[in-house]
Image (cartoon, rainbow, N blue to C red):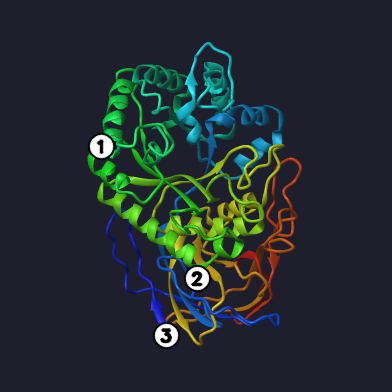
């Protein structure tokens, strides 16, 4: 029997565990529910504070001593600035679209993306959301009216805004004027500003000459900061890094925490950074290797931010770069991937994960007509599961060597109930789970109720027909939790987690 014991990881402050803790042991028995052979692939399963492998029989020991609180309202959205026009039209005409944001609590709406570096500030002009950086008549034109409409929407949903400013234009004076107007119109709903987007790629995108590097970026950034601060008192988020170059680390060493309030990085699962040139598929998106690569990057970035004594946010995130991949980014698989990533971010005290949207992209959480996609269902379940929760420290004992592609996360709620969030990323392999609460040597805690909320679809590749707790989101954009009871006797409950699904199991 192998054993992996996890220990709390405090990204921002050192912490110590109390030694006297009441333990709950959860036995999870995994059995095949079909004749398909199990893939022998080592996969992460319990991600606070470490990842581990879930085998056919595993015993998870969960402490009743609460750990660190999960960051509230972790989920945000990122919108291409060139897509403000269709987004604002939905916000003004589609009440369910407004409700989708409210369902996720109070959070951050980041306005940016590549199109920010081709936008033009014309305060009294005619707004335009076209995107042709080489034609001044077909570029996104930002006006006071657009900014006013955006913050009207932000106040309606009780979110704050990160506003992106054009660095590629290299015009600090005009940008300072834009920032002053945005700050005036945004008021308390303005979280802060970003300057430029993914500067590592400026030379590649033709925005700067080939010799332009991170030192030139920091020089230009500093000029912008100076110009803006002459006009308005503002917070800044940066550097909006995208890649594995040293720019992020060096930027924080030189600028933080005096200049920026939050450090920012982008992450796309299927990208040159993580998966290289591998064909984009659902198995690749949900593979152990992809998750492990994400973990390594999150560890690196959070450590670099911690060394600079500054918080980290993932301000642009999604399943695949370049607008996503049809048959992958718009499927149930994307919802499962998102839940895994959110838990991984939460374990590292990352304060925000903003899922990128651009009209018509395959990875969008909302369709062009304002309907939710499978991704949104995954985000909604995570938000519901983690509201007012703390981590439970866990250790895993393995009984045999038949791993399945499953993740599990243990939480304790404000009311004292405990939950296990299980994600079955197998393509066809259902899983029978038996949860048994074991008494420790001092106190026996008896659970009398068990419930489950399932995130389900007809298959892991389904692009529609997703349900959460056997229900779809209503036409009004609302969702009411439906917790199905699970028989529990002598602190033991059994259930099946279908292939390509997730479940929140709560014991009380």
On the question of residue 112 being in view, the answer is no
Q: Nearer the viewer, residue 119 or 365?
A: 119
Q: Earlier in the sequence, mark 3 or mark 2?
A: 3
- Within 10 Å of disc 2 (Cα), the crowding (few <14, some 14-19, many 20+) is many
Could you tell me which secondary element the residue under label 2 belongs to? Answer: loop
As drawn, the label of residue 45 is 2
Q: Earlier in the sequence, mark 1 or mark 3?
A: 3
User: What is the CA distance from the residue labelled 2 to the residue labelled 1?
Assistant: 41 Å
Q: Is the C terminus in the top left, top right, bottom left or bottom right quadrant?
A: bottom right
Q: Is residue 357 above or below residue 90?
A: below
Q: Is residue 214 above or below residue 59?
A: above
The residue to which callout 1 is attached is: 215
Residue 265 on image: x %, y %: 40, 45
The residue to which callout 3 is attached is: 2
Residue 295 on image: x %, y %: 42, 61
Could you tell me which secondary element the residue under label 1 belongs to? Answer: helix
Q: Say which residue appears at 29% left-offset and 38% top-offset.
A: 213
On the question of residue 223 being in view, the answer is yes
- Within 10 Å of disc 3 (Cα), the crowding (few <14, some 14-19, many 20+) is few
Q: Is residue 204 left or right of residue 341?
A: left
Q: Is residue 336 above or below residue 427?
A: above
Q: Say which residue appears at 44% left-offset and 56% top-offset.
A: 346
User: What is the CA distance from the residue labelled 1 to the residue labelled 3?
Assistant: 49 Å
Q: Is residue 292 left or right of residue 486?
A: left
Q: Say which residue appears at 50% left-offset and 81% top-offset.
A: 59
Front: mark 1 or 3: 1
């Amino acid at each position: 029997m192998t054993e992996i014991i996890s220990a709390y990881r405090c990204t921002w402050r050192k912490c110590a565990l109390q030694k006297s803790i009441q333990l709950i042991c959860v036995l999870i028995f995994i059995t095949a529910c079909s004749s398909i052979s199990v893939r022998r692939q080592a996969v992460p399963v319990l991600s606070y504070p470490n990842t581990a492998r879930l085998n056919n029989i595993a015993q998870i020991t969960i402490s009743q001593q609460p750990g660190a609180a999960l960051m509230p309202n972790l989920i945000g959205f990122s919108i291409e600035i060139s897509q403000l026009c269709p987004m604002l039209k939905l916000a003004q005409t589609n009440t369910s679209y407004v409700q989708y944001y409210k369902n996720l609590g109070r959070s951050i709406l980041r306005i940016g993306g590549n199109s920010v570096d081709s936008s033009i500030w014309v305060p009294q002009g005619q707004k335009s959301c076209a995107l042709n950086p080489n034609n001044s008549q077909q570029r996104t034109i930002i006006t006071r009216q657009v900014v006013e409409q955006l913050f009207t929407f932000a106040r309606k949903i009780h979110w704050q805004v990160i506003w992106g400013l054009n660095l590629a234009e290299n015009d600090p004076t005009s940008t300072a004027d834009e920032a002053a107007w945005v700050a005036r119109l945004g008021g308390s709903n303005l979280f802060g500003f970003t300057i430029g987007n993914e500067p590592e790629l400026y030379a590649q995108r033709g925005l700067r000459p080939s010799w332009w590097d991170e030192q030139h970026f920091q020089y230009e950034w500093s000029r912008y900061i100076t110009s803006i601060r002459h006009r308005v008192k503002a917070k800044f988020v940066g550097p909006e890094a995208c890649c594995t170059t040293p720019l992020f680390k060096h930027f924080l060493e030189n600028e933080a925490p005096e200049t920026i309030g939050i450090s920012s990085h982008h992450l796309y699962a299927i990208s040159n950074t993580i998966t290289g040139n591998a064909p984009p598929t659902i198995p690749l998106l949900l593979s152990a290797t992809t998750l492990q690569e994400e973990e390594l990057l999150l560890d690196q970035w959070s450590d670099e931010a911690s060394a600079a004594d500054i918080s980290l946010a993932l301000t642009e995130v999604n399943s695949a770069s370049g607008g996503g991949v049809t048959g992958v980014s718009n499927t149930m698989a994307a919802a499962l991937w998102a839940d895994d990533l959110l838990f991984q971010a939460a374990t590292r005290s990352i304060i925000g994960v903003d899922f990128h949207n651009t009209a018509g992209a395959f990875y969008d959480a909302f369709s062009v007509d304002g309907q939710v996609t499978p991704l949104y269902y995954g985000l909604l379940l995570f938000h519901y599961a983690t509201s007012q929760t703390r981590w439970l420290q866990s250790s895993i004992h393995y009984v045999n060597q038949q791993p399945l592609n499953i993740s599990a996360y243990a939480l304790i709620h404000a009311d004292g109930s405990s939950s296990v969030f299980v994600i079955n990323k197998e393509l066809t392999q259902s899983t029978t789970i038996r949860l048994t609460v074991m008494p420790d040597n001092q106190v026996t805690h008896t659970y009398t109720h068990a419930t489950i909320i399932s995130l389900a679809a007809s298959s892991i590749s389904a692009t529609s027909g997703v349900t959460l707790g056997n229900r779809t989101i209503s036409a009004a954009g609302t969702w009411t939790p439906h917790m199905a009871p699970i028989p529990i006797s002598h602190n033991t409950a059994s259930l099946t987690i279908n292939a390509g699904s997730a479940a929140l199991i709560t014991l009380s």
